[in-house]
Image (cartoon, helix red, strand yellow):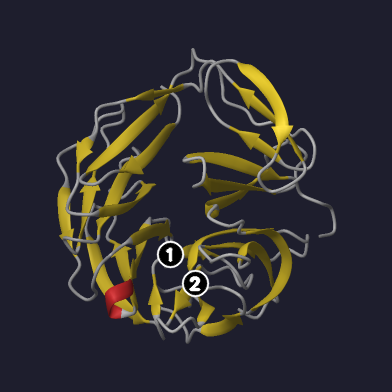
Amino acid sequence: MGAAVMFVGPKSVGVLHGRHDATELTITIHGHRDIRREKTAGTHTGPCPVGGHCRRHWVHDSGISLRDSLPAGYIPTAVATGDFNGDGKLDFVVANGGDNNLWLYLGKGEGTFSLPIIIPVELGLSPVWIATGDLHGIGRSDLVVAEPDSNSVGIFLSNGDGTFIESSVALPDSATFLLVGDFNRDGKVDIVAPMDDGNSNVYIAMLPGLGNGTFGSPVLTPLAGYVPWISWASSADLNGDGFRDLLLVSNGSIQEIAVQVFLNKGDGSFTAGQVVAQDFGPDVFLTSLLFDADGDGLPDAVSLLNLQCKRKRALVVEPYAKGS
């Protein structure tokens, strides 16, 4: 059994299992911007919706097989993985925004899972995003949950046996997405939360971790040009200074910034960097990831573009430019 990919539906969780006997899905870069879509085998070269020239490459088999979906609560919106009971087997947890709870599935180690353990969210409202990290530095997978209707981040510290201790961190405004990592290089896990106040004021909050499961006061970075909100974010060291930078995606209107780099200043704040893409009429960017797509050891930006005029979606690959 290879790696697994998880996704959420209206009231279910899907599991895609990797197969060792299948062709591996790869992305290769041809030119400045590329589009990739899985389909039948073949290639096609043509114009990109974001300008430039593209080469489209399709593969026979991505190496992923669809397993039967598992039940979830009402409005499941995010899933995260980790070993939550210390048995060395991979588990996963689902955030159910409509039920105000988390569903924990303990893995059996062969691709199946036990019946879900329902964890109520008692100190916050509407858990819509979930991430994991070792918040107190003892080798356990803790949970960090975005709770937009209470302007808070839920902290669930693991007991190492599949149970958690809940606490809450107040935010200045609403956050629907979170990143977890060491953003100030002090060896402790921090939280980055893109936020909006409902009045077109958008900014980033960095909560510095104290290493014991608690966090310091948020450091705020206002964002210009992001209307109405940040819909996605990813992080990597983009300029080689050792600090994790951000790539933000906004569901903006026409001519609004869609995908932009924000460079880490090292003190919990960020400064605006390269605009990777802008919205084009009805076409909007939905999400973006930073990873090494072409094997050169440098992070590339891969964004999902919703082509509303053609009712299609495409992956846009932006190769890393050294020094940018």
Dot 1 lies on which element? loop
Tell me which numbered mark, 2 or 1, is placed earlier along the sequence. Answer: 1
Identified at 40% across, 81% down, the residue is: 198
Query: Mark 1 — residue?
Result: 177
Q: Residues within 10 Å of mark 1 (few under 14, many from 20)?
A: many
Disc 2 from disc 1: Cα separation: 7 Å
203 with respect to 320 (left or right)? left
Q: Which residue is at 40% across, 58% downward?
A: 131
To which quarter of the image does residue 45 belong? Answer: top right
What residue do we see at 74% from left, 34% from top? 29
Please name the residue that numbered disc 2 is placed on.
Answer: 194
Frontmost residue, 200 versus 180: 200
Image quarter where the C terminus lies is bottom right
Q: Is residue 244 visible?
A: no
Is 284 left or right of 10, judged from the image as shown?
right
Give the residue type that dot 1 points to. Answer: Phe
Asked whether the residues under the numbered discs 2 and 1 touch, taking CB atoms below 8 Å apart as contact, a structural biologist would say: yes
Vertical arrangement, residue 151 with respect to residue 119, above or below: below
Q: Quadrant of residue 77?
A: bottom left
Secondary structure type for disc 2: strand
**Nearest to the observer: residue 82 or residue 41:** 41
44 to 125, vertically: above or below: above
Q: Kindly identify the residue that appears in the image at 85 percent across and 58 percent down.
A: 323
